[in-house]
């Protein structure tokens, strides 16, 4: 079993910064891609940023220039540094990881962390 635990969410004023952390634990041979998604009530979950095991990153247009995704050297944690936050960034942020466990690939989600940006 693999668990993803997000942390770092909270309330911040517009223009402020937050850094989210996603920590993976369990039976993990390797983690391929890790990503951050967000969701607001009534809307579909959307990709914010992703990073492969080789360090290749991808960002949603709304995140480009403001957010930075990274992974630690052990490749089991991912971070999302969010700067210049806007009220429209308010959402529940979820971490997703594509994990190689016992030779098969599985997709896991964290429980989510709330980010609220006040105007």
Image (cartoon, grey):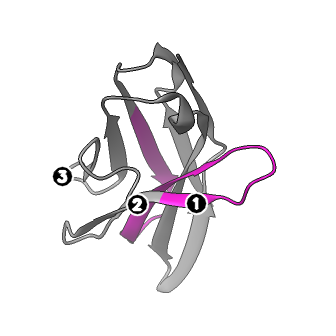
Say whether residue 23 is magenta: yes
Q: Could you say whether the residue bearing mark 3 is in a helix, strand or loop?
A: loop
- Residue 83 falls in image quadrant: top left
Q: Which residues are magenta?
A: 20-47
Residues at discs 1 and 2 in contact (Cβ within 8 Å): yes
User: Which residue is depicted at the point 50% across and 80% down?
Assistant: 102
- Residue 91: mark in rendering: none
- Up the image or down, 85 lies above or below 109; here it is above
Residue 7 location in percent, x, y?
50, 31
Q: Earlier in the sequence, mark 1 or mark 2?
A: 1
Q: Between residue 77 and residue 28, name the one nearer to us.
A: 77
The residue that disc 3 covers is 73
- Res 115 quadrant in image: top right
Q: Distance of mark 3 from mark 2, alpha carbons?
A: 24 Å
- Furthest toward the front, the residue is 119
Q: Which mark is residue 46?
A: 1
- Residue, disc 2: 60
- The Cα–Cα distance between marks 3 and 1, rounded to whole angstroms, is 26 Å
Quick one: label 3 or label 2, which is nearer the N terminus? 2
SS of the residue under disc 1: strand
| 109 up-or-down from 104: above or below | above
Residue at left 41%, top 37%? 21
Query: Which residue is found at the position 43% from the left and 19% from the top?
Result: 14
Badge 1, how many Cα within 10 Å: few under 14, some, many 20+? some
Question: x and y percent of residue 79 in the render?
Answer: 34, 43
């Amino acid at each position: 079993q693999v668990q993803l635990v997000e942390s770092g969410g909270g309330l911040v004023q517009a223009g402020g910064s937050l850094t989210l952390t996603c920590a993976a634990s369990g039976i993990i041979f390797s983690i391929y891609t890790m990503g951050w998604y967000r969701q607001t009530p009534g809307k579909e979950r959307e990709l914010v940023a992703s990073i492969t095991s080789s360090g290749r990153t991808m960002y949603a247009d709304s995140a480009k220039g403001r957010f930075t995704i990274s992974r630690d050297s052990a490749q089991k944690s991912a971070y999302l540094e969010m700067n210049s936050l806007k009220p429209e960034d308010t959402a529940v942020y979820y971490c997703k990881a594509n994990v190689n466990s016992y030779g098969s690939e599985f997709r896991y989600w964290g429980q989510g962390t709330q980010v609220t940006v006040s105007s």
